[in-house]
Amino acid sequence: MKKKETYNIAIIGATGVVGREMIEILEERQFPVNELRLLASEKSVGQKISFKGKSLTVGLAEEKSFEGMDMVMGDTPTEVSKMFAPMVKKAGAVFIDCSSAFRADPKIPLVVPEVNGEAALAHDGIVAGPNCSAIPVAVAAKPIHKKYGIKRMVVSTYQSASGAGKGGMDELAAQTVALLNSKEIPLKVFAHRLAFNVIPQIDAFLPNGDTKEEDKIMKELRKLLNAPELALACTAVRVPVMCGHSATVNIELEKKASAQEISLLLEKAPGIVIRDDMAKKQYPMPMDIAGTDEVYVGRIREDHSIPNGINLWVCADNLRKGASLNAIQIAEYLIKNPS
Ligand SMILES: NC(=O)c1ccc[n+]([C@@H]2O[C@H](COP(=O)([O-])OP(=O)(O)OC[C@H]3O[C@@H](n4cnc5c(N)ncnc54)[C@H](OP(=O)(O)O)[C@@H]3O)[C@@H](O)[C@H]2O)c1
């Protein structure tokens, strides 16, 4: 990225839950924006969205939309990101994509700035943002892996409805209202009713019994931690929470560490807030952390079922640190380290 005073930014998927959050974050963080171009599908053309006190009109995402842009943020479904990426590259802009389209490609950097920001600088036009559960777990695991070495990690996620986009949030809200009125409504987004339930399936099953979501979380954690052989197990569960993903993380360390040592280490690590006080019943919960930017860690304790075990509870806003904020932090990293 060439050094400039201000940058031309386009957001594809500006009308979705990640895209809308991104617009707010650009304003909150006073990102040096010259022009902001909001793009979506035909269905949203003409919608008005406010940015810095101005009303911007959503345009159709198409090949010519990317001309003159420095960076294009991809907040669309995977297939849509795949379709637009070559057009963005052709226009000479950097594509920072929140979908899963490019995360597994070994030539494309998968980046969480606190974990491996420098990887973004090796991009060839595309930088991928990871899965919304992989991001907070990687932020918490990175300092631990660096100091004590992680031998094996078991990650169990509790993922909110907004992880499935606007459609997921609308479905949970409608199901809740319908159930309280003794009615059922047809399912569109989730495999089963989510209201007053938990669903141990996110995305489709693979032949080995894992879901695609679990497979993505494990592969992305290995790539982010630069630990291709790391032993990992994952179970991803959808819970009836609107916003905020949580995870229990059971870690087997190479070198022994006490809970207090892990707590002190994480307290100093970038992007992490410790909320861990048993006496005061303090630990991170989605209802408290939704709308915030950090990764919260609590319930830090030793796991006595194995020699060097540590258990953590990790929580973050999936729409912010889990997607839009992370992508903007990647953009900030690129502009702070011009080529
Ligand atoms: N939600 C999360 O927590 C989260 C976290 C990490 C990553 N992600 C990823 O981020 C991406 C966006 O997710 P989301 O949750 O914001 O979904 P969403 O609320 O369903 O929004 C999807 C957006 O994509 C746009 N879109 C769909 N088809 C399009 C097309 N052909 N051309 C242009 N725009 C199109 C939609 O525009 P219209 O309104 O015009 O249809 C909408 O703005 C997905 O790849 C998702 O996997 C999401």
Image: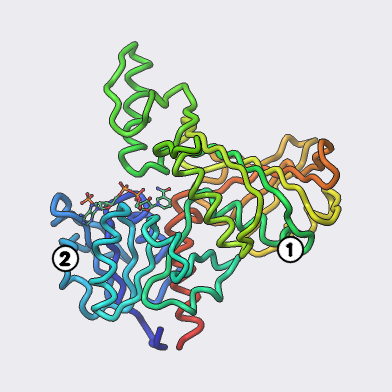
Viewer-proximal residue among 304 and 300: 304
Residue 67 in picture, x, y percent from top left: 20, 78
Decide: is 278 above or below 54: above
* Residue position marked by numbered label 1 in the rendering: 268
Report which quarter residue 141 is drawn in.
bottom right
Q: Look at the image and tell me in which quarter the C terminus lies.
A: bottom left
Relative placement, left or right, of 179 versus 144 is: left
Question: CB of residue at label 2: within 8 Å of ligand 1?
Answer: no
Q: Where is residue 27 in the image (x, y as percent from the top left)?
A: 39, 66
* Residue lying furthest top: 182
The image quarter in which residue 107 lies = bottom left
Image quadrant holding the N terminus, namely bottom left
Q: Which of 137 and 326 is in front in this view?
A: 137
What type is the residue that disc 1 sits on?
Lys
Q: How far apart are marks 1 and 2 (CA)?
A: 44 Å
Is any part of residue 287 visible from this angle?
A: no
Q: Mark 2 points at which residue?
A: 62
Dot 1 or dot 2, earlier in sequence: 2
335 horizontally vs 250: left or right: left
Residue ID at (70%, 51%)? 274
Structural crowding at the residue carrying mark 1, measured as other residues with C-alpha within 10 Å and reported as few (<14), some (14–19) or many (≥20)? few
Task: State left or right for residue 279 relative to residue 156.
Answer: right
Residue name at image x 24 percent, y 68 percent: 37
- Could you tell me which secondary element the residue under label 2 belongs to? loop
> Measured along the vertical axis of the image, is residue 50 above or below residue 159?
below
**Residue 245, position as x, y percentages in the image:** 52, 43
